Amino acid sequence: MGVLNVTPDSFSDGGVYFDNVEKVISQAKQMATEGADIIDIGGESTRPGSESVSETEELRRVLPVIERLVKELSVPISIDTYKPRVAREALKAGAKIINDVTGLTNPEMVKVAAEFKCPVVIMHMQGQPKTMQTNPHYNDVIEDIKNFFKERIAVAQMAGVSEIILDPGIGFGKTLEHNLTILKRLSELTNLGFPLLIGPSRKSFIGQLTGGLPATERLEGTIAAVVTARLNGASIVRVHDVGACRRALQIADAIINT
Ligand code: HH2
């Protein structure tokens, strides 16, 4: 899954594609050429400390991009939003997947997913982006996330949503230790019976482990995290650097399949 944020303030690609539809389209095409199977379009940053934007502004950012991409690319588009109206309009415009960092906790979002019969990414987040990194706490990070997933799966299935992808939410209300534990024990989430998605790309835990490297210099760390996640059962990885991660995964998959 290639990440494309149409925002002024995303932590890694903020401002690069903002208000520049041509640049977004060309980057999306590049990601497709490099082997992306899904392109994830986001119109609001959810990085730690971020402020939310209005529905109107988020739609203004993402709709023109989605309308163009569905015409010019065969790769399916996911909409990275927790706002039901944004998801609905994006799906109407041709997006195929909802990527909800709030894990369908808004009942309206469950209704949208059921209405469009589309796949959904249920991501785990503790708290809200503005404050989630202030002292996150778990009894057992994997067990707590698993319990959250079980509850959300039940709600989604009850509403008729069947295509579910689970994401433990690297960096969303998680300390360095929590992120590492998630990557190390990811296989414990596979027995829920749904594909796992993981999004470590360029995130701050990689900077923390490499002497404070900035987001632009976290590719090797991203690859290490993505390969570990794959070996531990991830089906989808959400990354900014599609070509490099794809090549790394070819090797990981060859090893897995030997
Ligand atoms: N991470 C981000 C945003 N959306 N969705 C899923 N399913 N999993 C993730 O780990 C995830 C996500 C944050 O990263 P990014 O989009 O690069 O930055 P920002 O939120 O600043 O736009």
Image (cartoon, grey):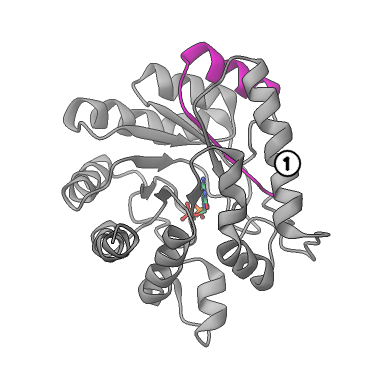
Q: Position of residue 34 (x, y in %)?
A: 19, 53
Q: Is residue 42 left or right of residue 185?
A: left
The percent position of residue 24, horizontal first and vertical second, equals 27, 45
66 sits to left or right of 120: left
Question: Which residues fall within the magenta stretch?
Answer: 107-125
Residue indicated by mark 1 = 148
Task: Answer left or right for 217 relative to 181.
Answer: left
Q: Residue furthest top?
A: 115
Along the line of sight, which residue is nearer the eye, 45 or 244? 244
Placement of 24 over or under 132, stated as above or below: above
Q: Residue at x 42, y 21 (%)?
A: 91
The answer to if 115 sits in the magenta stretch is: yes
Quarter of image, res 123: top right
**How crowded is the residue under tag 1: few (<14 C-alpha within 10 Å), some, or many (20+)?**
some
Figure check: 28 above or below 137: above
Q: Is residue 170 visible?
A: no
Task: Check disc 1 and give the amino acid type.
Answer: Phe
Q: Is residue 67 above or below residue 33?
A: above
- The residue nearer to you, when weighing 222 against 52, is 222
Observer-nearest of 18 and 65: 65
Q: Position of residue 79 (x, y in %)?
A: 44, 34
Identify the secondary structure beneath mark 1.
helix
The magenta stretch spans residue 82? no
Counting from the top left corner in percent of width and height, residue 114 is at: 55, 15
- Give the residue at the far right of this rendering: 139
Q: Residue at x 17, y 31 (%)?
A: 72
User: Does residue 84 appear anywhere in the picture?
Assistant: yes
